[in-house]
Amino acid sequence: MTVAKYAFGLYAGGFIAFLNVLTAVGFAMVNTMAGAEAFYAVTNTKLPLVVCILILATGYGCSIEITLTR
Amino acid sequence: MVIYPFFGILAGFAGSSMQNLPIPASGQTEMANWMSFMATSLGYAVTWGPFSADYSVYMRENTGTVRLFCWTYFSLITSQILVMALGAALATCIPGSDAFQASFNASGVGGLMDQSFQGHGSAVYGFGKFIQLILVLSTVAVTIPNLYSLGLSMQNVGMWAVKVPRIVWTTIGFIVFTVAAAVGRDHFATILANFLNCLAYWYVSHI
C-alpha cells in the first residue's frame, strides 16, 4: 500500500488504501458469517446465529489483539 | 495444510451423496450466467492480491520464471481451487435430496456438512461434529490476515492516521465487521455474491 502512493500520489494513494480497508472489513465479515453458519450447524441450530457470530468474532478479535501486542 | 486432512474426511463422507449433474442446455443465457459466476469466483481469489503484499516472500532476482510459476500455481491450487471444488461438490448433494435441502435451508453451508455425516451411526456423527468444529476454527486463519492488513492499510490513508496506534484501527474494524455480520446474518449468499461482484470490478481492472 505504501508503494501504491509512489504511483498514485499522496491523496489518491490514501483513497486506495481506504478502499483496501473496506475490502478487509467486508472479507472479515463474509468469513465470519461463513464460519458462524458452520458453527450454527454444529450446535444443531439451537444456538441463535447472532450468538454464533458474536462468539466467533470475539475469538478473532482477541487473537489479533494478542498478536499485535506481542 | 493442517486443515487438509479434515477437508478430505468431509469429502469422503459426503462423496456418497454427490451427483454428476448434467450441464444445462448451452445458450447465450447459460453462457452469461457462467461468465458472471466465474467473475465472482475470480473476485474472491484476486482480492487477496493487495493483502498478499503484507505477507510476501522475497525471491532472488535470478529465480527462474518456470520455478516462480510452479510455486504460484501450486499455492493457488491448494489454497483456492481444491477448496472451491469441494464447496461446489457439496452443493451438488442438494438437488433431489429432501434431507440435504432441509438442512441447507436451516443452516446454509454448515447444514450441508452436518448432513454429510448423518446416516453412518452415532459415533460417526459425533466424529463429524468434531471435524466441523475444526473447520469452524479454521476460519480464524482467514480472518486474522484481513484484520492485520486492515491496520496497515488504514495507517496508509494519511499522516493523521499513522498517529493512531494500529491496535486501535484493528479494534474499530473488528467492531464494524461484527455489527455488519450480525445485521446481515440472514442474507449470507446474497451479500457474498454482491460483495464479490463489486470487488471483481474494482480489482481485476488493476491486477
Image: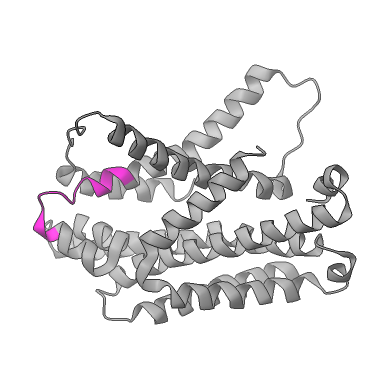
- Decide if residue B12 is on the left or right side of residue B161: left
Of residues B105 and B14, which is closer to you in this image? B105
Residue B44, compared with residue B188, is above or below; it is above
Whether the magenta-drawn stretch holds residue B80 is answered as no
Q: How did the renderer colour the structure?
A: one colour
Of residues B95 and B165, which is closer to you in this image? B95
x and y, in percent, of residue B79 in the image: 50, 42
- Decide if residue B8 is on the left or right side of residue B191: left
Q: Residue B185's image quarter?
A: bottom left
Residue farthest to the front?
B28
Of residues B31 and B159, which is closer to you in this image? B31
x and y, in percent, of residue A1 in the image: 78, 51
- Decide if residue B157 is on the left or right side of residue B8: right
* Magenta span of residues: B88-99
Could you tell me which residue is drawn at 19 percent across and 30 percent down?
B25
Could you tell me which residue is drawn at 40 percent across and 76 percent down?
A52
x and y, in percent, of residue B207 in the image: 65, 37
- Decide if residue B151 is on the left or right side of residue B85: right
Residue B90, compared with residue B38, is above or below; it is below
Q: How many marks?
A: 0
Could you tell me which residue is drawn at 59 percent across and 75 percent down?
B176
Could you tell me which residue is drawn at 27 percent across and 67 percent down?
B107
Of residues B63 and B202, which is closer to you in this image? B202
Whether the magenta-drawn stretch holds residue B89 is answered as yes
Residue A35 visible in the current orientation? yes
